[in-house]
Image (spheres, rainbow, N blue to C red):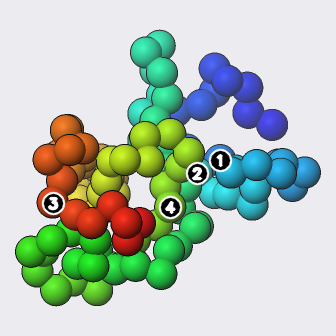
Amino acid sequence: MKQNSDLAKGNLLISAPFLNDVFKRSVILLAEHNEEGTVGFILNKPTEYKLDQIIDDFPEFDATVFLGGPVQQDSLNFIHRSTRNFALLRYPADPDSIPHSREKI
């Protein structure tokens, strides 16, 4: 079992089987882990929505939206693979400026 000091950006965490909360049966990618805190995204909880269904005027794009975690559920984050490594993008920093339909999510 990894100790907290062994955690690093890019690690995958698998929830303990006995958890009975939002992390139940979750696989989490750590996007950041440092002295300021940790950012991670749940990778295995797809929703029924596609990206172009929740962002108004977004081009048709067949990408499933995933439930990414219990914190900051009013933001939309993108995980993608670049030619160098995994990158984290936030769209946009101000959740009120996201052109989407909150009732769909």
Residue 15 spot, x, y in % from top left:
75, 50
Local packing at callout 1 (Cα closer than 10 Å; few below 14, some 14-19, many 20+) is some
Mark 3 to mark 4 CA distance (whole Å):
18 Å
Q: Which mark is residue 13?
A: 1
Residue 46 spot, x, y in % from top left:
52, 73
Q: Secondary structure at mark 4?
A: loop
Q: Which mark is residue 99?
A: 3
Residue 33 spot, x, y in % from top left:
48, 28
Local packing at callout 3 (Cα closer than 10 Å; few below 14, some 14-19, many 20+) is few
| Left or right, residue 22 beside residue 1 | left
* Picture quarter with the N terminus: top right
Mark 2 to mark 4 CA distance (whole Å):
11 Å
| Among the two numbered marks 2 and 1 on one chain, the one whose residue lies closer to the N terminus | 1
| Among the two numbered marks 1 and 3 on one chain, the one whose residue lies closer to the N terminus | 1
| Among the two numbered marks 2 and 4 on one chain, the one whose residue lies closer to the N terminus | 2
Local packing at callout 4 (Cα closer than 10 Å; few below 14, some 14-19, many 20+) is some
Viewer-nearest of discs 4 and 1: 4
Say what amino acid the circle numbered 4 marks: Leu
| Left or right, residue 27 beside residue 100 | right
Q: Which mark is residue 28?
A: 2
Say what amino acid the circle numbered 1 marks: Leu
Mark 4 to mark 1 CA distance (whole Å):
16 Å
| Among the two numbered marks 3 and 4 on one chain, the one whose residue lies closer to the N terminus | 4
| Among the two numbered marks 2 and 3 on one chain, the one whose residue lies closer to the N terminus | 2
**Residue found at x 73% / y 33%:** 2
Residue 64 spot, x, y in % from top left:
39, 77
**Residue found at x 21% / y 68%:** 55
Q: Secondary structure at mark 3?
A: loop
Viewer-nearest of discs 2 and 3: 3
Say what amino acid the circle numbered 2 marks: Ile
Q: Nearer the viewer, residue 98 or 36?
A: 98
